[in-house]
Amino acid sequence: MLDKYKIGFEDIEMEIQISEGKRFIPEYIIKFPELNKGTEAIYEEIKNRLISKIQLIDTLEQRKKLKKQFKEKAEREIKKLLPNLSAGIKNYLLTLLIQDMLGFGKLEILLRDPNLEEIVINSSREPVQVYHKKYGWVITNIKIEREEDIANYAAMIGRTIGKQITILNPLLDAHLPNGDRVNATLFPISNDGNTITIRKFRREPWTIIEFINNKTISTEVAAFLWFAVHYELNILVSGGTGTGKTSFLTTLLPFIPPNQRILSIEDTREIKLPDFLHWVPLVTREPNQEGKGKITMLDLLVNSLRMRPDRIILGEIRRSREAEVLFEAMHTGHSVYATIHADTAIQTYRRLISPPISVPENLVEAIDLLVVMYRDRRSGIRRVYEVAEILPQFRKTIETEKINLLYKWERKTDFLSKHHESKKSFSKLKMLTGLNEREIKRELKNREKVLNYMIKKNIRDVNSVGKIVSSYAKSPDKILKKIK
């Protein structure tokens, strides 16, 4: 056995075992309570009795209201037909019955496991597979027996957000009420059967302290980025799929002073900031069944400029018009943060100036810092791979020389080491702060002390980290004295 742990599932605990698999990848085994055939048959009978009493649920509010009523009916049926069961088995059957009727059945157990990043149903012929943070892809002992059930789960997800998935419209891109992103496809678009892919999002947002603890970033670089965010340098976070771009961007945002207005624009709510920040989250909307009511990122971005923002956060740059408005916002004095798909700093630059984004080179220079994220697929670790700055056109003419690499991750040492001195960011920070280079370096060391203090005291939740950062912005000497 490779691992064993327990997770909470409603009012009960489920044991998870991970062992060496027979098909070259590990197996993820949920230890279900053993039921005899008679109990299983009666369970199915209770389910069939109750299923006729369940009306179609279109909204989250309806589901919450119905869940309480349904639980009372299910308890009565179990007590009447299975009076001699132990309390533990009764609780298990009741929980499973509620999830079968109103949720995703045994899939709900996978949704509760914080160690999982992805849940994948490929068809009714294959077991459900999951991506485990420690062990990568593993095969579970859960199998959805009928294609109709997979299609029903997809339809249920769609209904909660006003979307439909049908033979005529066999693709669904949606999100669960808790923020998890869902993609579904129906046969014959997916040849082997209906599919559902659920990307899980962490319930508690990452903080910079956790990223330092797990070696995603060094304290030195974290202090530098804190200083850069505080004084409104524009930052773009890039990386491949699953490298943690949005998570890392979220860790930087508590560095924004609390007296500034922040607007975030996303397709799905992923960003979470400390409660005391002045933050207005905006989310796009898909059209209704008549094709009306669509609100795009561009709509929200243009509108956000009329809302007097100090900082603008864009979930991801995808298209030319979005990028154009975003860079115009930078040039009109707004501080901007965004993510983009690219594997290195030079690739990020090339992607920005090439189709389909095609931002003019003179506008791209408004970005002060590029942070590139990397994920090692073999070990599952995530790291800040590069921190770089884009130099002005008059300074360099060769494309590769437009990127000044400040820090780079070394695989052999697993360390983010200094590569070059800053030629642009430090000059801008001098201008914004009125400090000379020696004073800036001293300030960076002070911020390292604050970060190390939070590491030592195990202060890592988003609100606690945000409060110390904001207290330092207001009274740095007071915080340094407390630390000393």
Image (cartoon, helix red, strand yellow):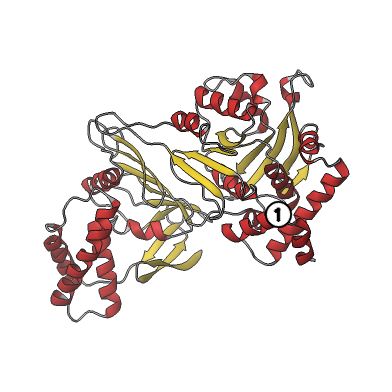
Residue 220 versus residue 336 in the image, above or below: below
Front residue of 223 and 194: 223
In the picture, residue 483 is in which quadrant? bottom right
In the picture, residue 31 is in which quadrant? bottom left
Return the x and y of residue 131 as percentages of the image width and height: 46, 51
Quarter containing the C terminus: bottom right
Farthest residue, direction right: 438
Q: Amino acid at mark 1?
A: Lys
Residue 15 versus residue 405 in the image, above or below: below
Return the x and y of residue 477 as percentages of the image width and height: 79, 59
Residue at x 61%, y 42% (from the top left corner): 374
Residue at x 28%, y 67% (from the top left corner): 95
Residue 1 in view:
no
Count of numbered badges drawn on the protein: 1
Return the x and y of residue 326 as percentages of the image width and height: 56, 29
Residue 410 versus residue 345 in the image, above or below: below
Residue 363 versus residue 9 in the image, above or below: above
Residue at x 41%, y 49% (from the top left corner): 180
Residue 303 in view:
yes
Q: Is residue 478 left or right of residue 286?
A: right
Secondary structure beneath dot 1 equals: helix
Q: Is residue 39 left or right of residue 280?
A: left
Q: Which residue is mark 1?
A: 474
Q: Is residue 482 left or right of residue 339?
A: right
- Crowd band around label 1 with a 10 angstrom C-alpha radius: few (<14), some (14–19), many (20+): few
Front residue of 435 and 355: 435
Return the x and y of residue 136 as percentages of the image width and height: 50, 51
